[in-house]
Image (cartoon, rainbow, N blue to C red):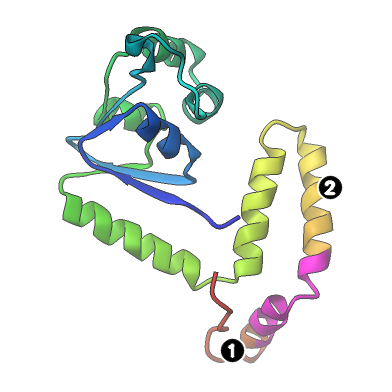
Amino acid sequence: MKPIIAVIQGACVGAGVDLTTAADVRYCTTDAWFQVKEVEIGMAADVGTLQRLPKVIGSQSLVRELCFTGRKLESGEALQFGLVNRVFSTKEEMLKFAFETAAKIAALSPVAVQNTKKSLIYSFDRPAQEGLDHIRDINTLALQSEDFIAAATAAATKGEAAEFSKL
């Protein structure tokens, strides 16, 4: 359950949208555009777009418009509706930021990062109390991990940052 960062430049069509919606974090360039094109070739999107896009964007009406018509969604609108987190002027800026973000995540405890992702997924469509119960159970186990002990020791001694195994 490692975090997935997607970077998009130019056309993101069909299965590209499927893969993009499966990512945890999404960045694109100003020239990026997204299209659920399957409807134009006589089929329904079949690898996750119809299941994930409504949860990512949130606007059922917009999702239906895009999926029923095959209309292109430009980068600015993708940002406005939450399909992407940020829009960059150049591919180089986008990749630099994506790699910096990945490095920040990779420097953290893999136990904490993976448990955070699991809990976010678990809690998405459930009542808050179920999510709280879930994270309590996860953290009960995490408190016994080497990662927690290393981080707590580093914080208590105000020493160097804890080093964790690779994500």
Residue at left 68%, top 58%? 115
Confirm or deny contact between disc 1 and disc 2 (CB under 8 A): no
Q: Does the magenta stretch include residue 14?
A: no
Number of the label disc, if any, that sits on residue 33: none
Q: What residue type is labelled 2?
A: Asp
Q: In which quarter of the image is residue 68?
A: top left
**What range of the chain is rendered magenta?**
141-153
Quarter of the N terminus within the rendering: bottom right
**Residue 92 vs residue 60: left or right?**
left
**Residue tagged by mark 1?**
158
Mark with earlier residue (1, 2): 2
Q: Is residue 150 magenta?
A: yes
For label 1, the SS is: loop
**Residue tagged by mark 2?**
133
Query: Measured along the vertical axis of the image, is residue 63 above or below residue 91?
Result: above
Residue at left 63%, top 59%? 114
Residue at left 50%, top 23%? 46
Query: Residue 129, position in %: x, y?
Result: 82, 39
